[in-house]
Image (cartoon, helix red, strand yellow):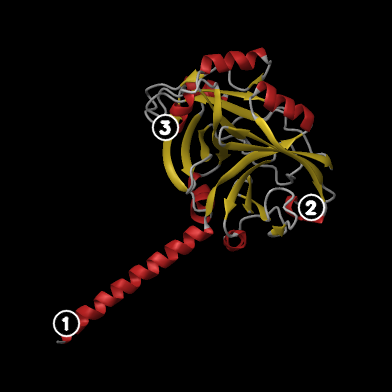
Amino acid sequence: EKTENTKVSLGWLIIALLALLAFFSAVGKAQSVRKIESVGFTVSDMDRAIDFYTRVLPFEKIFDTEVWGDRLEHLSGVFGARVRVARFKLGDETLELTEYLTPQGRPIPVDSRSNDKWFQHAAIIVSDMDKAFRHLRRNKIRFASTAPQTLPKTIPNAAGIRAFYFKDFDNHVLEILQFPPDKGSPKWRDLAKTGKLFLGIDHTAIVIGDTEESLKFYRDALGLAVAGGSENFGTEQEHLNNVFGAKLRITGLRTREDGIAVEFLEYLAPRDGRDFPKDTKSSDLWHWQTSFAASKTDDLAMILKQNRFDFISGGVVSFDENALGFRKAFLARDADGHAVRVIEK
């Protein structure tokens, strides 16, 4: 009888533990981000940016407004800020650009390289690399790669991918990318059948110093999941990044809901990339922000503070008038200095 009672007690204990695990799993999901709502950066001239992103690239402008006041100052960390914000769609994905009318920030350093820690880009999927490259050349874009590159069979997880880096008028780096039939989301293959050339944003890539440290922010704190990885090297990768001897550990991460992904670029060689400037302001043109949608911004802010990540904002800022398309938001920095905005609609 005693043995039977012990079995019953163990059974109830197991059930209780499973229920507790389910509870904490549900809590974790509630606190994690849902998806990347947009990716964007600071520009020097919004009218020129609108021309570039709607004429050279076929984004559709969907939002254009000016915002100022103490709430913006507390969110951006920039005193006296007055900004013009425009949002653009390409496929299902959103690009958000911000011009600081006051105070103006600093330009991207002219000697920036793809292995500097402030490097970030948005990867735009195309259905035909050669046609897209000819279109960009006709519009006199600035080169970042020497030419479109096809990654070789010696990199199994990336073999057959075609890619090219280029710059807008402010020297923000963008990528056009074409997947072979056996790689990438089926979504891109379906969209390619529509005959469109530029299809949408697949991911935003950031240069990091240490993959495991960056996972503590994006996976452990924000709740993203590792979706895959690759170790890229060789002349094609060198000429894509325009960095001699480039050897990268690449890690892809995805949110719970489908959409734009995050890609880590850890340079195993060369290791001479410069650190993110500690005095960076949101008004500086190298400021990018990856904007995550969440259900509970306050909970996520508390998690990031407990883990001692740096904040740009003074805390969670409420926007009662919904001027920017969300009710609450905050800006924080990852382990390397990249800005992340968490919003609650």
The first of marks 1 and 2 along the sequence is: 1
The first of marks 3 and 1 along the sequence is: 1
Q: Which of the two discs, 2 and 3, sits closer to the camera?
A: 3
Q: Secondary structure at mark 2?
A: helix
Amino acid of disc 2: Glu
Mark 3 Cα within 10 Å, few/some/many (few <14, many 20+)? few
Residue 179 left/right relative to 122:
left
Residue 344 left/right relative to 7:
right
Image point (67%, 19%), residue name: 141
Q: Nearer the viewer, residue 327 or 80?
A: 327
Image point (42%, 67%), residue name: 23
Where does residue 166 sit, x and y in percent of width and height? 62, 23
Amino acid of disc 3: Pro
Q: CA distance from mark 3 to mark 1?
A: 54 Å
Image point (57%, 18%), residue name: 132
Residue with the mark numbered 3: 186
Question: Taking the image as drawn, is residue 156 in sight?
Answer: yes
Image point (66%, 38%), residue name: 40
Quadrant where the N terminus sits is: bottom left
Residue with the mark numbered 1: 4
Where does residue 231 sit, x and y in percent of width and height? 43, 33
Q: Is residue 63 above or below residue 114?
A: below
- Toward the left, the furthest residue is 1
Q: CA distance from mark 1 to mark 2?
A: 66 Å
Amino acid of disc 1: Glu
Name the mark on residue 73.
2
Q: Secondary structure at mark 3?
A: helix
Q: CA distance from mark 2 to mark 3?
A: 41 Å
